[in-house]
Image: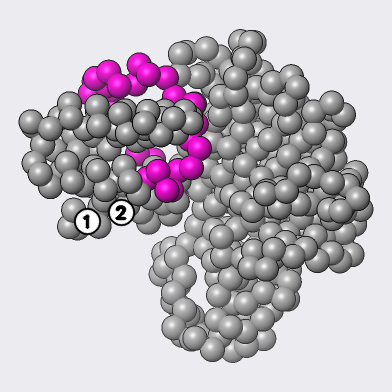
Amino acid sequence: MNPQEIEIIIIKYFSQSANMDDLDVLNKWIESPENQLIFQEYVKTHFAITLAMNDPDITVIKNELLKEIRKGKKKESKYRIGTLMRYAAIAILFLGIGFLMQKNFFTNNSDKELIVPQKDEITLQLENGEIQVITAGKKNKVTDSKGNVIGNQNGNKIVYDTKTPLNKLAYNTIKIPYGKRFELELSDGTLVHLNSGSSLKYPVAFIAGQNRQVFLDGEAFFDVSKDKKHPFVVNADNLNIRVLGTHFNVSNYAEDDVTDVVLVEGSVGMYQTNEKFDVTKNTVLEPGFKGSFSKKDKRINTASVVTSTYTSWMQGGLTFRNMSFKNISKKLERHYNVSIETQNTKLENELFNASFKSNESIEKVLSYFNDVYGIKYNIKNDQILIK
């Protein structure tokens, strides 16, 4: 792999847009001691960017970046410096407002082990950017970057219960790989069920006087703890979902044209992130309804649905409604942790409605599509070819 290709993957990694294949490539590349040193320079630059992005003074951003890059100027080639500067410029566009960083991360951390997660591991990114691997089924204490206990893992669930008073928000980000699901109990008692291939960014502890806001990529079911003084807001890219206390499902996968919100109990408001919530103007769902936010034209359509159809994934079920086979393939990859190649372009655009019970094998799912469409497929380990 040439330097430009690995550079792109590293940028995607820090901007949280790397897929499982990217992580696999990065993990193999970083096995080299020489590449570990290169990666450390990216880490330092990334920390400088994320720290500076929390300061409104643009000169701080420039000064922090130049300071870090100049430290290694005599040791690095012209190519490496140019690469880092390109990364700095691109990463600012990717990252937006970063998580809060501490300045002591600009010290020499070469004695610390670099962690690049395997593509089938659950990972937890701490407030300082450090990544921890979460082994499902274990019992462990969850600590912050300073070693303070902020929660406990018991099996496939982490419960946050920080005793350390906070005067500003500190975020964790959990990423669930393909083929796995996980649960979180946030510091306010809100329960979150995360589907495979999803990530959630959330505060270690919520702060009095501020909304309880989290950021979702993928799919999750929320059982929100009631607190009238502190509305709970789920950010799904350009859509906000605002609640006080309720049960609802949000599906916000990248391949889908819409973000779906299905309300089981309570009430939720849907509005764009560039708007302020107004109950008289924004879409408010009632139980048993689905709100679909179009990522293209930003409109919200509502419809009455059977909610259990859209929450069956928590028990391992699969449901497809008026969905193209191209999107279905992506969801099957995520659910079963497999790779699917479709050579039939006509099939990719066909729309299907189907539901599968929990623990159905991938063979049985493909057998269904063979029955209704006559597809030909071949399964070899975790590779599936559809002709």
Say what amino acid the circle numbered 1 marks: Gln
Answer left or right for 167 relative to 383.
right
Callout 1 crowding tier (Cα within 10 Å): few <14, some 14–19, many ≥20:
few
Q: Which residue is mark 1?
A: 4
Kindly identify the residue that appears in the image at 67 percent across and 86 percent down.
Answer: 372
Q: Position of residue 51 (x, y in %)?
A: 42, 28
Placement of 130 over or under 221, stated as above or below = above
Residue type pointed to by label 2: Ile
Q: Are marks 2 and 1 in contact (CB under 8 Å)?
A: yes
At 17% from the left and 41% from the top, the residue drawn is: 81
**Residue 302 shown in magenta:** no
Residue 196 location in percent, x, y? 58, 51
Q: Which residues are magenta?
A: 91-120
Q: Quadrant of residue 157?
A: top right
Task: Check disc 1 and report its element: helix, strand or loop.
Answer: helix
Q: Which residue is mark 2?
A: 8
